[in-house]
Image: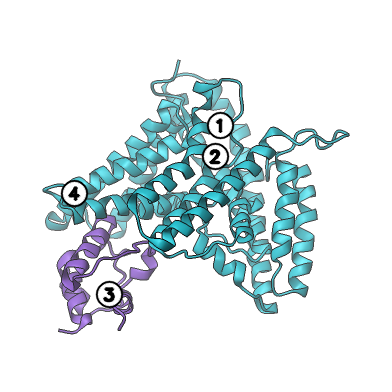
Chain colours: A cyan, B purple
Amino acid sequence: MIPYATFTYFGVLLYAVVPAVLLGMLFRRIRVWILGASLLMILVQYSRGLVAWPPTLGREFWLLCGYALFQLVLVSAFIRIRQRAKRRGVFIAALTLGLLPLVLAKAQPYLAPGSLWGFAGISYVTFRALDVIIGIQDHTITSAPPLELAAFLCFFPTLSSGPIDRFRRFAGDWERRRTRAAWLEDLDGAAHRIFTAFLYKFILAALIKRYWLDPAAAEHGLWATVSYMYAYSLYLFFDFAGYSLFAIGISYLFGIRVPENFNRPFLATNIQDFWNRWHISLSTWLRDRVYRRFTLAALRGRWFKDDRTASYLGFLLSFGLMGLWHGTRSFYLLYGLYHATLMAAYELFSQWNRERRVWGEGLGWRVAGTVLTFHVVCFGFLLFSGRIGPDHA
Amino acid sequence: MSTAETVLNVLAQVSRTEAVRDHLDLRLYDQHLLDSLATVRLIVAFEEAFAIQFDDVEFEREDWATPGHIVAFMEQRLGK
């Protein structure tokens, strides 16, 4: 069953959420129910034919269980080795192993067509698992009790499509003892987000899809494609931001304050600003984990004559990975390269502009920046949609 | 020279903005004085100035939001 998509799902969700609210009122921590509700909802989300009798557990369910067990063993082993010594080779081995299930799942269509090696959400869960491995290497994570780690990896509200939480942040909420005031605050945060989510996903996104996106998709020609570009971009935002708000709102009910994923992205005044506002949990992950680490290594080791070369390669690496992470279709990679180029071009331009002051500061310039950024971004989504580009027949 | 002075010297140099010395609440990222590359340049410049190596570079932008934040962050990292 696809999360947050049907009213049946929301009906079943009540069995997880109502006890969470009531238990939260009675107890300062509801950790047992976080695990219990996750198990219940995972059973629902990953089972086919649950309504039939006898119920059958799908292959995805067992793949998820195996995956979680694998990551638990990997993390425990890596913590033990890291406590003795910091070794780069072991770190790289742990990262590779942590990434392996995702790589296999993405490669499966080429290696074993028709089979199923992954489960919905594996790419998101992998980012959370790698976060733990990187934290252990940096010594910011020194222990990861199995139940806490399992709760972090398999926390059901964010399992299928994020936001991508971080272990240290999650651990703070996991330990937190809520006062009555904090419980009320979480309830308030949840209600606000869940209602906005219904507006975004079931009203705005649904209307755009039915009356604009679907008709535009059926037509051909330049204008239809332009119209499709706007419709697809707006639909993507309302659908994904709506989904994210559901996931964050439901998490709040369990006392887990998952980070925000969107902050009015279409009001961004430049492309860097946009990536601080769109799919924030993914872009900050890539910025801090991939871009920063790569550029830092390059600057420390003086790999290049100019620092900016390191930065451009850093963008290429992070956005290339982002493209591949979405899927192995060539238009996803193209989408990543497109944004890497934009980020590098913007960096070059803003440095040049610091001296020349061609692009000003006033309101007019800001509006121009927003309009320009919006169009550049929409064209990126058009590439992402696969309607134009190399794979298009 | 105190830690704070050194930090502000380095910051003024990397951000190419003298104002950071006197305005400790300047929003560095919001005002486009720092970006992703400048963050990394700053880390390397601090490592050279204080002869240290950062083990953990996983801080959030909010931890370095203003010159005041960065001074506090560095004082804490240097254990003062």
Q: Label 1, label 4: how many angstroms apart (C-alpha)? A: 40 Å
Q: Label 3, label 1: how many angstroms apart (C-alpha)? A: 47 Å
Q: Residues within 10 Å of mark 1 (few under 14, many from 20)?
A: many
The residue tagged 4 is A308
The amino acid type of the residue labelled 2 equals Tyr
Secondary structure under the numbered disc 4 in the rendered image:
helix
Tell which of A160 and A60 is nearer to you: A60
Residue for point 48% across, 38% down: A100
The amino acid type of the residue labelled 3 equals Pro
Q: Label 4, label 2: how many angstroms apart (C-alpha)? A: 36 Å
**Which label belongs to residue A269?**
none
**Which label belongs to residue A213?**
1
| Side of B30 where B1 appears, left or right | left
Residue for point 50% across, 64% down: A168
The amino acid type of the residue labelled 4 equals Arg
Tell which of A24 and A343 is nearer to you: A24
- Give how far across and how far down residue B4 sits, in percent: 23, 81
| Side of A293 where A68 appears, left or right | right
Marks 1/2 in contact by CB < 8 Å: the verdict is yes
The residue tagged 3 is B67
The answer to whether tags 1 and 2 share a subunit is yes
Secondary structure under the numbered disc 3 in the rendered image:
helix
Q: Chain of mark 1?
A: A
Residue B63 in which image quadrant: bottom left
Q: Label 1, label 2: how many angstroms apart (C-alpha)? A: 8 Å
The answer to whether tags 4 and 2 share a subunit is yes
- Give how far across and how far down residue A357 sits, in percent: 16, 56
Of callouts 1 and 4, the N-terminal one: 1
